[in-house]
Amino acid sequence: SAAEAQEPETKELALGFGLDLPFAVHIVAIEKGWFEEEGFAEVTTKTFTAGALAGEALVAGEIHLWTPGNLPPISMVHNAIPVVVLGVDSINLGLDKLVVRKDANVSAPEDLYDIKIGLLEGSTASLDLANLVDHYGLDASRIQTVNLAPPEQLASLISGDVQDILVWEPWPYRALQEADAEIVHTGLVSHFDANAGEEVQISHNRSIFVASQDFVRENPNTVDALMRVLMRASRYVADPANKEEVLKLFSDFQDQDIEVNRALWDNYVFDPTIDQGYVADMEATADFLEATGRIRDRMNVLEYTYT
C-alpha cells in the first residue's frame, strides 16, 4: 500500500546526545511520543562527552543522528568523510564566551598576550579566537593557548593553571559560579572596557543535524520521518508559550537543575530555517578551516546540505 511504501526502512533509531540545551528538541520529541507516531518502534540515545567521539560513532553506524556545532562536520565533509547536514537545530552565536579570572586583570584585548587561554582545539572556540584576534588587530603568535576539553578548562581556570577559557555554555556559567571570574567577550558582544556592550560577532556557531550520507541514501523514508519529527519538535520548543514545559521535560530527562537551564535558555535560538544566514555562518566557518589549512577543494555548503 501507499502507506507501507512510506514506512521507515529503519524503525530503531539511535541518537547521539550531549548534555546541553540543543537536545531539548530531541527530548521533547521523545517524551511526546512523536517518533512512535511516525512509525519508529524504538529510539535510544547515546551520550558523548566530546563531539569528535560522536562523529566517529556516526561514521561507524553506531548512531543515526549527530547534532554538533557546525565546525567539525564541515571539516569532515571536506576531508572525504561522507556526512551530510539535514537541517539546523539551533543558532548559538552568543553561546561561546571568553571567561577570565579577575586577578588576571584583563580589561583590553592586548591583555590576552599576558595569560594562557584554555580551549578545545578544532572546536568552534578556535574559530572564535581567530575572529577575535582579527577584529582587534592582535598578533596571533603572541596568544598562548592550552588544548583542554571543557571539564579540564574549568578545573584549570579554578586552579590558575590557565587564566582564561573560551568555551560554550554551560561551562561559562559554571566558571562564574565556581571561580572568581568574569566574561570579557561573548560570541556577539564585547565586554572589554573600551567598547563594552558593542556588538562584535566572533561566533558562527550553529547546532546542526548531521547524518551519514550512506544512511540517508539507503533510508529515504526513515530520514523523511525523522526530519518531520525534529521540525515538529523544533516549532514546539521555539514557541515561548511552551518554554516552562520544555525546560522541565529537558531537565528531568537529563537530571539537571532546571534553574541553571532557565538561566541559559536565551543563549539559544531554535530556528531550523535554511536561509542566507545559515549559508553565511557555514561559509565563514569553512573560510577559517581553509585559511588554517584544514580543508582543501572548497565545496559550496548547499552541496552537502540535504534539505
Image (tube, rainbow, N blue to C red):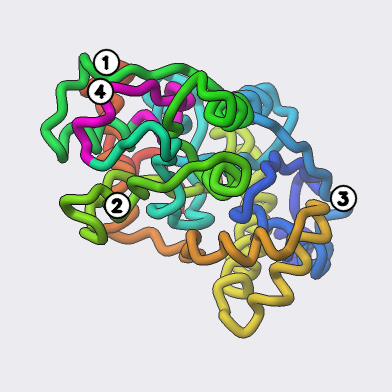
Q: Secondary structure at mark 4?
A: helix
Q: CA distance from mark 1 to mark 3?
A: 42 Å
Which residue matches tag 4?
113
The residue labelled by disc 3 is 42
Q: Do the residues bearing badges 4 and 2 touch, measured as CB atoms within 8 Å?
A: no
The extreme front residue here reads 103
Membership of 76 in magenta stretch: no
Type of amino acid at the residue the image marks with label 2: His
Disc 1 target residue: 293
Answer with mark 1 or mark 2, whichever residue precedes in sequence.
2
- Residue 118 belongs to magenta span: yes
49 relative position to 298: left or right? right
Q: Nearer the viewer, mark 1 or mark 3?
A: 1
> Label 4 crowding class (10 Å Cα cut-off): few <14, some 14-19, many 20+?
some
Find residue 66 and report its horizontal and vertical position in percent.
61, 40
User: CA gap, disc 4 to disc 1?
Assistant: 24 Å
Discs 4, 3 touching: Cβ within 8 Å = no
Residue 288 vertical position relative to residue 14 in the rendered view, above or below:
above
Q: Earlier in the sequence, mark 4 or mark 2?
A: 4
